[in-house]
Image (cartoon, rainbow, N blue to C red):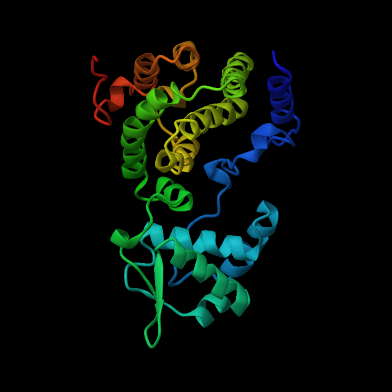
Amino acid sequence: MSTLAHTMMTAARSTDSGLAGPGELDRYPYAEGPVADRVGTPAWDGGEPELGRVSRRAAASRGRGLHGQLVQQLGQMIVSGDLGADRPLVPEEIGQRFEVSRTVVRESLRVLEAKGLVSARPNVGTRVRPVSDWNLLDPDIIEWRAFGPQRDDQRRELSELRWTIEPLAARLAAGHGREEVQQRLCDMVEIMSHAMAQGDALTYARADTEFHSLLIQIAGNRMLEHLSGIVSAALQVSGGPVTACDRPNETSLAQHARIVDALGTGDGTAAETAMRQLLTVHPEVERVVPAPREH
């Protein structure tokens, strides 16, 4: 096993909390914890009077800070439909409800505006925008949709998108192989193998995420490279039997290894085929993507 692989596996198991310690894998963003640990989506009207204090305590425990936690709360409320389209958002009301300063509210609304969730106009104020205006490729919006009422649609759409971009990325990556990249992909497969043998789902998921993100990044297509965050988000929030990657087994591990071998020999067709086989759905959800086609 390479030194890098050993370091990453050691780091990923370094704490009792289940979160990875310092290590290479931590250079990438991962979900902060299981769904059960997330702050629930409150109703705007008739909310609990302690909502603001609860939010602040949750922010401290999760390390988000007031600004990040408010973005999370408001984003979840908008995406879930608790705050419907064209709903006015009054900064003063938000500040009082969540017990945060005007500065925190203002900065949070700016973040949400950048994501297309709200708009602010003179003499109109800040209002919730319709779904058609949202940046649906934003990793935060992907997460909020995946854990809200639209969870089934979000996971299906992510699977369809992955089916479209990842086989292409695998084919293109075969022409851009570099020794250090090949070694890193091999490291990821080795980590996944060891993690699966140990029943270490967290380490497996993190190595799997890096594998797929790195593959897209080396495809040599900058537009595809910008989609690597979407694939990472898809792997983090899948939460259901959509692709082989969601259920670690010897077959999916072998497909990862075949992709690496194909990249090493520059065989784009083999790399694409292996990726399609890896992304093949389970029988109970075969409606998500079509069956692999012969080339």
Q: Is residue 141 visible?
A: yes
Residue at horizontal 61 percent and vertical 76 percent from the top:
103
Tally the marks.
Answer: 0
Q: Is residue 199 visible?
A: no
Residue 182 drawn at (x, y percent)? 56, 19
Question: Vertically, is 129 above or below 290?
Answer: below
Residue at 50 percent across and 70 percent down: it is 109
Task: Tell me residue 114's x, y (percent).
Answer: 46, 64
Q: Residue at x 36, y 26 (%)?
A: 167
Furthest residue toward bottom: 123
Quadrant of residue 277 within the rendered picture: top left
Name the foreground residue: 255 vs 102.
Answer: 255
Could you tell me which quadrant the C terminus lies in?
A: top left
**In which quadrant will I find the N terminus?**
top right
Q: Is residue 196 above or below residue 134?
A: above
- Image-quadrant location for residue 160: top left
Task: Find residue 72 and report its horizontal and vertical position in percent.
Answer: 53, 59
Which residue is located at x 45 percent, y 33 percent? 220
Left or right of residue 183: residue 42:
left
- Relative to 183, does residue 14 appear above or below in the rendering? below
Rendered view: 274 above or below 127: above
In x, y percent, where is residue 282? 33, 21
